[in-house]
Amino acid sequence: MSKVLIVASVASMIDQFNRPNIKLLKELGFDVHVACNFIEGSTCSSDKIQQLKTDLQSDGITFSQVDFARNITRISQNLQAYRQIKQILNQEKYDLIHCHSPIGGLLTRIDANKYRKAGTKVIYTAHGFHFYKGAPLKNWLLYFPVEWICSFFTDMLITINKEDFALAKKHMHVKHVTYIPGVGVDLKKFSSNTLTNEEKLTIRRSLGIKDNEKMLLSVGELIPRKDHETAIRAIHKLNDKRIKYFICGQGALHDHLQTLINDLGLSDNVKLLGFRTDISELCCCADMFVFPSRQEGLPVALMEAMASGLPCVVSDIRGNTDLIDDGKGGFLCKPNDVDGFAQKIKMLLSDRDLSTSMSVYNTNKLKKYDISAINSQMKRIYQKAAKN
């Protein structure tokens, strides 16, 4: 039986993005192993991570703790992680290694290169390069050389947005560069028809939303890259008591954002909901999705909102522009543009026909991102890797 290792820096990358890959590899007859940091860095709750470990064990998946740090400057911790992944690769002798996330991908590909000479195939999925159009110069100076060097140690590079694909084809030395539009969305789960109108009303009332009020939703870690502060300040600028804005996610900026909400007098209008397991239900109940992120690969949260038929107001950045056609499925605003976000949110709230047309447009566009289509592409990739 062929043996495959899936590597990610943190467990949430396995839980949120790689469960379909694990299932697919099992169906193809692989002995599947997983290595990541189960202890720190995840965007999921501790209960969710424990459930992941239980599920992996139940499915006969071997999993290992590797102390990857998400920050590349934590050199001591990442040296420890390198020693750990080196030991795993030396013991197990994998036929295929599929890496995710910059740190995990870097450390694993460096050590795995010597095994490629014996036939091991190495795949790397870039969930959004840290160097991109408009990225800080330090990102290009630090991350581009790392990815360029590692491309020599990679048999296939998978990119998930068009900008990264074009860049990789031009600059990276990997033999095969493939574009796959993200990790897919379960369109049945995120259909707006999964809940009855009565069920939607019950959920909205549980959140304190009155019949004449509008529910705005964001999903993402409470970290600078997601820039929830811009959306919060846009809500303050609108000064519309009918707006109820909910942010799902956890992270280091929780206390800062809560203080900002209180200082702006928005405690009745803006709520931090923390980590949620009912995102599909919340999307079905919302009136609009707001996504002010500064950097994305191909955001799953945005795809899920679109699949639910939500009109979207998002930042005009790589990844978002693959998904949102400006003026058709939503509006694109410059990053950090409080006035721009406020203007477009107000425009959508005041034009029901426009909101409805955007809802239909997004639902139709997301059909090509269905999980079944993505799985078909990944199946071909794994089968090709196993034959070569």
Image (cartoon, grey):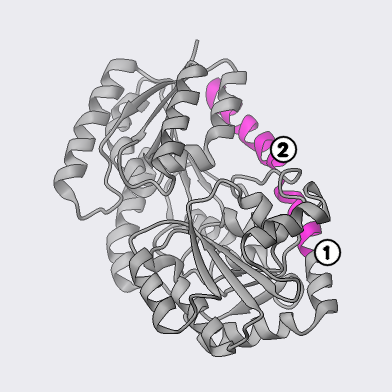
The single residue placed furthest to the top in the displayed view is 1
Q: CA distance from mark 2 to mark 1?
A: 21 Å
Please tell me which residue lies in front, 247 or 21: 247
Circle 2: residue type: Ser
Q: Nearer the viewer, residue 306 or 146?
A: 306
21 w.r.t. 200: above or below: above
Q: Position of residue 272 (x, y in %)?
A: 48, 64
The dot on residue 372 is 2
Mark number, residue 360: 1
Q: Secondary structure at mark 1?
A: helix
Asked if the magenta segment contains residue 375, the reply would be: yes
Q: Earlier in the sequence, mark 2 or mark 1?
A: 1
x, y (%) of residue 215? Answer: 66, 69
Q: Main secondary structure of the magenta part?
A: helix
In the image, residue 154 sits, relative to residue 89, either above or below, namely: below
The magenta span reads 361-387
Q: Is residue 154 visible?
A: no
Residue pushed farthest left? 76
The residue at the point 67 percent across, 85 percent down is 346
Location of residue 249 in the rendering, given as x and y in whole percent from the top left corner: 47, 57
Residue nearest the viewer, comparing 71 with 177: 71
